[in-house]
Image (tube, grey):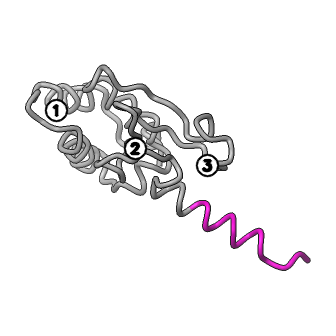
Amino acid sequence: MLLSDSEYNRHEHDAMVRSIASQPELSITEIIEALVVGYDSLYTTDTMEINNGMCDDFANDLKIIIPRARVEWVDDIDQSVETTHAVAVIDGCFYDSETPNGTTSVRDIPLVVRERGIFEILASSPKK
């Protein structure tokens, strides 16, 4: 789902992001968990849906909350990854809605793992 396909209200969305950003005591993990709850509250979505269409918005929201974050695409970071997916890069780790604890390899991001499995199945399927 894309934000543009949901009941997106910029005022409510920005207020949710500002509310999380106003809590400097939160860890990166807690910020991501709060952002997921905010997305669910506003858009009735879960982490898999966020990562399947809202990943760029989510990563950019993390950049607003954590200014040292950078938004990057996993297929630009690792050309062997066949998944187009935006992540926040913070202190050398990669974060998205399903990876609140971060990972040092984009190949360990759950969406990348799932899609790699799909590509492997398709590649091993008999050709017609």
Q: Amino acid at mark 2?
A: Ser
Q: Nearer the viewer, residue 103 or 16?
A: 103
Q: Amino acid at mark 1?
A: Ile
Asked if residue 86 is among those painted magenta in the image, a careful observer would answer no
Q: Residues within 10 Å of mark 1 (few under 14, many from 20)?
A: some
Which residue is disc 1 drawn over? 20
Which residue is disc 2 drawn over? 6
Give percent across and percent down for residue 94.
Answer: 41, 41
Q: Residues within 10 Å of mark 3 (few under 14, many from 20)?
A: many
Which of the 4 quarters of the picture holds residue 3?
Answer: top left
Q: Residues within 10 Å of mark 2 (few under 14, many from 20)?
A: few
Distance between the Cα atoms at labels 2 and 1? 21 Å
Q: Nearer the viewer, residue 111 or 17?
A: 111
> In the rendered structure, which disc, 2 or 3, sits on the residue that comes first in sequence?
2
Q: Amino acid at mark 3?
A: Thr
Identify which residue is drawn at 18% across, 25% down.
18
Do labels 2 and 3 touch, CB within 8 Å? no
Give percent across and percent down for residue 107.
Answer: 53, 52
Asked if residue 126 is among those painted magenta in the image, a careful observer would answer yes
Which residue is disc 3 drawn over? 83
